[in-house]
Image (cartoon, helix red, strand yellow):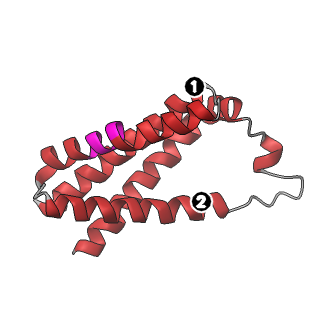
Amino acid sequence: MEYISVIIAAVGSYGFGAVWYMTLAKPWMSASGVTQEMVKPADGKQDMTPFIVSAIASILVAGMMRHVFEMADITGLGKGGLAGLGLGLFIVSPWIVTNYAYGMRPRNLTLIDGGYATIGCTIMGLILGFFAG
């Protein structure tokens, strides 16, 4: 059941990310400097590498979160969601803020990516907590 909960948590967060970034595509592209031509070149073949990398990353994050939750005896939706929120808001997002500050990236990009990290981790925590509860 552990592997299934990790995969479901990763898919949940990844799916949220798809909605998040489709909704915020224009402001994200403006803040990141990514152009439509970079995303979809003239040949029409979109590079799938970012999607594959982010799927693998989601599985790794969910797997480590499940491990941490088990070690800390975090069970149930409430504890799982709160732990996920805390990990996203106080561990992942500060790393993003640090990297973007040194990289002189726009604040809006920091908010968009940090928001995804925080909410994505919360979703993972809710799902992992549900399966552990």
Residue that label 2 marks: 51
* Residue 102 left/right relative to 81: right
Say which amino acid is labelled 1.
Asn
Secondary structure, mark 2, is helix
Q: Tell me the quarter of the image containing the C terminus.
A: bottom left
In this rendered view, identify the residue nearer to me: 20 or 124: 124
Does the magenta-highlighted stretch encompass residue 86? yes
Mark 1 vs 2, N-terminal side: 2
- Tell me, for residue 10, which label it has, or none: none
Q: Is residue 24 left or right of residue 81?
A: right
Q: Is residue 128 left or right of residue 49?
A: left
| Residue ID at (59%, 59%) | 51
Mark 1: few/some/many CA within 10 Å (<14, 14-19, 20+): some
Name of the residue lying farthest toward the front: 102
- Give the amino acid at mark 2: Phe
Residue at 18% from the left image edge and 55% from the top image edge: 129
Determine the secondary structure under disc 1: helix
Residue 102 located within the stretch drawn in magenta? no
Q: Residue furthest right?
A: 42
Label 2: few (<14), some (14–19) or many (≥20) C-alpha neighbours in 10 Å: few
Residue 60 lies, in percent from the top left, at 41, 64
Residue in view at x 39 percent, y 46 percent: 120
Q: How far across and how far down the image is residue 101, in percent?
A: 57, 30
Q: Is residue 39 above or below residue 66?
A: above
Near-viewer residue (23 or 125): 125
What percent of the width, then of the height, locates residue 107? 57, 24
Return the mark for residue 108.
1
Looking at the rendering, the stretch of residues picked out in magenta corresponds to 84-90
> Is residue 127 left or right of 50 when viewed as pictured?
left
